[in-house]
Image (cartoon, rainbow, N blue to C red):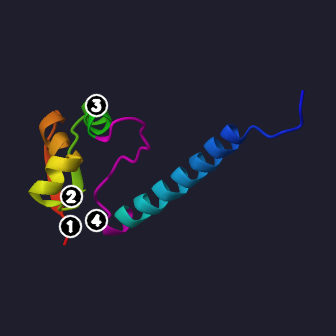
Amino acid sequence: MNDLVNTDLVDEQRFARLREKSAENAFAAARKQLDKDISAEEAILDGDPAKVIADYAGKLPDCMIIMGARGLGQVGQMLLGSVSHRVLHQAPCPVTIVKHT
């Protein structure tokens, strides 16, 4: 057996740490904006963003999704698609989309 490090494993571990740190920063920023009387569910999910958000929301009681939109415009949405638009149509609960200004 050779002494080389499996670079795929190292990259996966580095990606996992970066992902967790990035998520924690996003969650912390969101928490600052919430009223102290509002509870929120935080989760790191894998897969197609719109599908996993809608599926996850379907498992929670009395759920409401509040999410941002980047405001790509109609051309950008046609080329890239819109996660917020797909969540709006796929989620089994109310969805509020906040436009980025």
Residue, x 56% and y 54% (percent of image)?
18
Answer whether residue 35 is magenta in the image. Answer: yes
Task: Please rate how many residues cluster around mark 3, counting C-alpha atoms within 10 Å: few if below 14, some from 14 to 19, many from 20.
Answer: some
| Residue 6 vertical placement versus 27 (above, below) | above
Residue 91 drawn at (x, y percent)? 18, 36
Marks 1 and 2 in Cβ contact (< 8 Å): yes
Q: Quickly name the residue at label 2.
A: 69
Q: Amino acid at mark 1?
A: His
Chain part drawn in magenta: 31-49
Residue nearer the viewer, 96 or 69: 69
Kind of residue sitting beneath label 3: Asp
Q: Inspect the image, locate mark 4, and give the three-letter code of the amino acid beneath it.
A: Asp
Decide: few, some or many residues near mark 4? Use Cα within 10 Å; few <14, some 14-19, many ≥20. few
Which of label 4 and label 3 is nearer to you?
3
Quadrant showing the C terminus: bottom left
Q: Earlier in the sequence, mark 1 or mark 3?
A: 3
Q: Is residue 71 above or below residue 63?
A: below
Q: CA distance from mark 1 to mark 3?
A: 24 Å
Q: Quadrant of residue 6?
A: top right
In the picture, measured across the screen, residue 43 lies left or right of residue 87, that is: right
- C-alpha distance separating marks 3 and 2: 19 Å
Secondary structure beneath disc 3?
A: helix
Seen as rendered, the residue at the extreme left is 74
Q: Mark 1 or mark 4, which is nearer the start of the sequence?
A: 4
Locate the N terminus by quadrant: top right
Query: Residue 35: which numbered mark, if any?
Result: 4
Element type at marker 1?
loop
User: What residue do we see at 28% from left, 34% from top?
Assistant: 51
Residue at label 1?
A: 100
Q: Are marks 3 and 2 in contact (CB under 8 Å)?
A: no
Q: Secondary structure at mark 4?
A: loop
